[in-house]
Amino acid sequence: MAYRLGVDVGGTFTDLFLVDEAGGPRQWRVKTPSTPADPSQGVLAGVRRICAEAGIGPEAIGNLVHGTTVATNAVLESKGARVGLITTRGFGQILHLARSQTPGPLAGWIIMVKPDPPASLADTREAVERMDARGETLVPVDREQVSEAIRELVGSGVESLTVSLINAYVDGRHEREIAALVEELYPGFPVTISSDVLPEFREYERTLTACMNSYVRPHVAAYVEGLQSSLQGLGVRSELDILRSDAGVMTPREASRNPVYGVLSGPSGGVAGALHVAARAGFPDVLTFDMGGTSTDVSLCQGGEPTIGRETTIGQFHIKVPSVDVHTVGAGGGSIAHVPQLTRALRVGPESAGADPGPAAYGKGGTAPTVTDANVVVGHLPPRLIGGEMELDPEAARTAVAQVADAIGLSVDQAAEGILAIVNENMAGALRVISVQRGHDPREFALVAFGGAGPLHANAVAELMGSFPVIVPPSPGLLCALGDLVADFRNEFAQTLIRLTREASAVEVERILDELEGRARAWMDAESIAAERQSVTFVADMRYHGQGYEIPVPLERDVAVLDGRFNALHEQLYGFRMPDTASEIVNLRAIGAGVRPSPELPRAGRGDADAAAAIADRGEILFRGERRPTPVYDRAALRPGHRLAGPAIVTEFDSTTVVLPGYAAEVDETFCILIRPEEGRA
């Protein structure tokens, strides 16, 4: 496994990061245009190009990990499979009853367009069977009746089947029996059973998540199979691993069987990469700040671990899958600035110019003023991007921003700075959501900036948040691809156990944890993960008795400490605890992780602080209403120990870093740029 390749497919570019583990910490990076009609074509083009740049054949790649948005796009674009649903008799409308909600203030529900569930009533059949809440069979599966229902659904043209029976979270044997009938009648037909995907109580959430798995399953399976076949045609012999939504890795078999676990594959790669570089730099508590062309993703990580949520939103659906807790705001380099006629107040986003035509500075016909255009006007962006592959048009950028300036009676420079100030506040607002609003002081966290535009705005956003140092890793625009390489194999195994903690039997909890650990170990053994690389951790989902939501609480097999931990977490998240109300266990889960070796990245001792030799250019760049002479550094020439006093601009292949006046940047031993306030600055 000398060469390892991480591949991340974005909306505009496909990023590839190749490392050589045998010949020292050598690495290569490539950005190629994405091909939305068939993302695999962009991947294949990137593999050819990066292998050529490294001077190796594709057969030398020993490990390839892929972060993909295929499942996400299938949902957002309503291009999934036609799903058939088999549920318990009397529960055929489970997806249509759903959960009550208020979609907006006042009479917002009147104009709400309710989304169609992934399985229609016409494609739903009720099975004669029933199991009680203790897992006892009340009515056995009527095999003849269910077989007829299967024939009707498949004969009508459904492309995949979901089996979700009432109380199957306690025992899935009825679901497995029906799945076996499907295999007997139609060998190889894709079928999802809810007790495999989400063995937890709450029938609607379990059924919806299982149906969403069926909805994206044929599309993802075809993509994974086709890409792996094409890679083998190129000469790649390694298996194609897929990134999960919880920053873990799954095999192509698991990705084809349960693709719903990868619906947020892309953002999780960035968080994994950010955690890795921050830990190497000595900062385990970080806020991640990933700013791209359309949106910005932020997340909070503590103790070197990402925050994992139990529910995520894709389009208009709330599905329960473990995923990195990422908050997204519509603020990116392509966000359009506008002045509404009614308020005459400058607004930025969420509408984006996208990649085509893109910002006016791209010279592709775009005329709307964007954040990128504002950065060009003030001079924060150089005239050439991606190593000179993309030329920017400063005059087109000024013409676009002039539309805003004329509308509000400002100069072009003032309008450009106003656009940047507003988008920075928008992104700081997203960071407050995942920090301040959840009981965390952002001043206790470093800020890891990545994505194509993250380092451009990170210093200004950190100034608003008080989060220092700002950490700009090497190749920040390709950090998601690096994150693919540092992620470990991961899977979760859960069982519902609703017990007041004071009534929970230590023996009963221990028995369930032993069973869950056994399932986790069996899964890792089946994936050929060596015993010394296996680890299992435990979590209890808890709530106050009567609440409708849970909090994951770390568990080390000691039930006695759960009350105290839960109360402390609840107070941190919501600002209060309820000592007179009993706490309750809802679910127990085991998280199995197969540790993979992380790629070796460059590290060097500190040298001279003088970075003058790395200055590639100088310019009159606008900062806080004043154009100041500013050095422009070539990051490739920066070495550990170099110190840059603000204002300064650092350019590299895939991103640009801005150091504001009053701040100083230093290159650490891991080649990260660390930005801090100068001494004496609050």
Image (cartoon, rainbow, N blue to C red):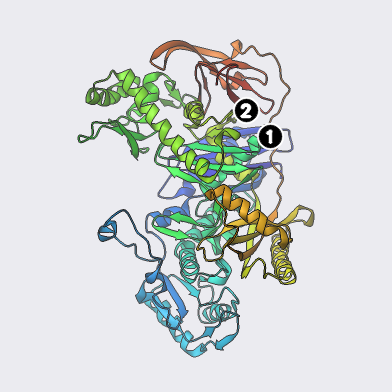
Going by the numbered disc 1, the residue's amino acid type is: Arg
Report how far apart the C-alphas of labels 1 and 2 lie in the structure: 10 Å
Count the numbered circles shown.
2
Residue 142: horizontal and vertical position, in percent?
A: 51, 89
Residue 439 as seen in the image, left or right of residue 317 = right
Residue 535: horizontal and vertical position, in percent?
A: 73, 55
Going by the numbered disc 2, the residue's amino acid type is: Cys
Within 10 Å of disc 1 (Cα), the crowding (few <14, some 14-19, many 20+) is some
Is residue 230 in view?
yes
- Residue under pointer 2: 672
Residue lying farthest front? Answer: 580
Residue 335: horizontal and vertical position, in percent?
A: 36, 35
- The correct choice, above or below, for 456 with respect to 445 in the image is above
The N terminus, quarter of image: top right
At 55% from the left and 13% from the top, the residue drawn is 615
The part of the image, by quadrant, that contains residue 496 is bottom right
- Residue under pointer 1: 280
Residue lying farthest right? Answer: 532
* Callout 2 secondary element: loop
Of the residues under marks 1 and 2, which one precedes in the sequence? 1
Q: Nearer the viewer, residue 514 or 605?
A: 514
